[in-house]
Image: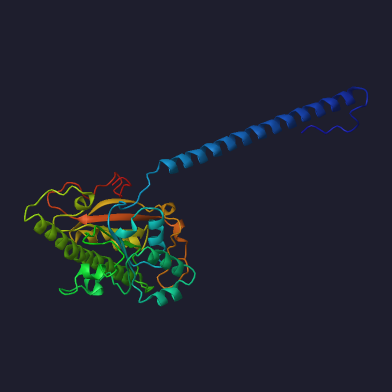
């Protein structure tokens, strides 16, 4: 290693010349180093901007997915603080006269105590629109919960909301967001079994309710046309099978224990097929707060940071070649 020269750069002679040369070399290296650093910094910034721009473009190009059409009828099951119901109305995804809201809880007061900061405002917003809201509706006992009978028909029940224009409409969609029994069972296997039972029975009861409501609508239409089965090409008619079955929509978080629920298998056991699934795009539902079933607290990890999917199930039609399409890796494609 060369010995560092001591002395003053301004001194005369060979020693001074060497010192001046060394200072010049050092200055050039410092300039080059600074230029290289600035160049790397610019490249990094350019790269980050490109990545950010690509991400923004991907987000813009991502198809906005809402699992039902604006002109379709829909019943929401197991609503918490009613923020999802309010969001889909405010965003114009559903007409207020085509919406029915149900809650498992017993009353307005119970929901006020459970969600003291969010429920009441949402509730009054929806009530002002004359949207039918039902309490004490168990998704595993839908017909019984609504107290539907021969003398107390569905249309008598729904038309008690006099200012609501439901009329003699069919029911096209039943949606249940993030099914949970609220028990917080620590035994994982038991927890999975009980949620499988919840989802399985929900499918059963949804099909029963569809058939009960929509068969009457279709029969009334046939009587009106004096028995002639005219082709009804309205969007509402196209969404139902000849038996009156519509779509059953579930939103479920990705990962365990939810994957172990095997909701597609549970659907198949009820004669249902997965007609489409897509990522749950949280940004599509501003104001929606997914909460615990027993309090206003968020889940352990904020819901909007968790991946989730919508699954749309329809009644299986024999001979249909359009069911359970998958992408190459076997998972549900967003285009399915």
Residue 77 position in % (x across, y down) = 31, 65
Q: What residue lies at 62% left-to-right and 34% top-to-bottom?
A: 42
Would you say 198 lies left or right of 315 here? right
Q: Nearer the viewer, residue 169 or 1?
A: 169
Residue 243, quarter of picture: bottom left
Q: Nearer the viewer, residue 149 or 30?
A: 149
Q: Please determine whether, in this image, residue 287 is positioned above or below residue 231.
A: below
Would you say 178 lies left or right of 269 here? right
Q: What residue lies at 44% left-to-right and 62% top-to-bottom?
A: 289
Quarter in which the N terminus is drawn: top right
Would you say 336 lies left or right of 35 here? left
Farthest residue toward the right?
Answer: 12
Residue 161 position in % (x across, y down) = 29, 68
Q: Please determine whether, in this image, residue 32 is positioned above or below residue 187.
A: above
Residue 271 position in % (x across, y down) = 17, 59
Residue 223, quarter of picture: bottom left
Farthest residue toward the front?
Answer: 163
Q: Please determine whether, in this image, residue 276 is positioned above or below residue 270.
A: above
The colouring scheme, among rainbow, by chain, secondary structure or one colour, is rainbow
Q: Nearer the viewer, residue 63 or 145?
A: 145
Residue 256 position in % (x across, y down) = 37, 61
Q: What residue lies at 66% left-to-right and 32% top-to-bottom?
A: 36
């Amino acid at each position: 290693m060369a010995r560092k020269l001591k002395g003053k750069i301004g001194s005369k002679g060979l020693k001074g010349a060497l010192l001046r040369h060394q200072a010049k070399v050092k200055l050039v290296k410092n300039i080059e180093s600074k230029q290289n650093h600035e160049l790397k910094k610019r490249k990094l910034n350019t790269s980050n901007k490109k990545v950010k721009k690509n991400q923004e473009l991907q987000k813009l190009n991502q198809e906005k997915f809402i699992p039902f059409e604006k002109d379709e009828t829909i019943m929401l099951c197991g609503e918490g603080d009613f923020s999802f119901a309010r969001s889909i109305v405010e965003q114009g995804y559903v007409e207020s006269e085509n919406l029915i809201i149900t809650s498992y809880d017993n009353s307005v007061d119970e929901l006020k105590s459970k969600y003291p900061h969010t429920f009441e405002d949402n509730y009054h917003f929806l009530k002002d629109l004359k949207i039918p809201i039902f309490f004490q509706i168990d998704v595993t006992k839908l017909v019984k919960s609504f107290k539907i009978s021969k003398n107390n028909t569905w249309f008598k029940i729904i038309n008690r909301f006099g200012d609501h224009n439901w009329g003699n409409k069919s029911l096209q969609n039943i949606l249940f967001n993030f099914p949970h029994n609220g028990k917080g069972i620590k035994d994982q296997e038991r927890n999975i079994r009980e949620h499988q039972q919840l989802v399985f029975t929900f499918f059963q009861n949804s099909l029963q309710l569809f058939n009960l409501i929509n068969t009457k609508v279709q029969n009334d239409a046939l009587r009106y046309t004096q028995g002639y089965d005219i082709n009804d090409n309205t969007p509402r008619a196209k969404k139902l099978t000849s038996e009156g079955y519509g779509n059953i929509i579930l939103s479920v978080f990705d990962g365990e224990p939810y994957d172990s629920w095997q909701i597609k298998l549970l659907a198949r056991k009820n004669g249902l097929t997965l007609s489409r699934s897509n990522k749950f795009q949280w940004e599509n539902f501003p104001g929606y707060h997914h909460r615990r079933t027993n309090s206003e607290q968020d889940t352990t990890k904020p819901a909007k940071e968790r991946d989730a999917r919508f699954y749309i199930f329809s009644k299986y039609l024999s001979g249909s070649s359009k069911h359970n399409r998958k992408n190459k890796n076997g998972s549900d494609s967003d285009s399915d």
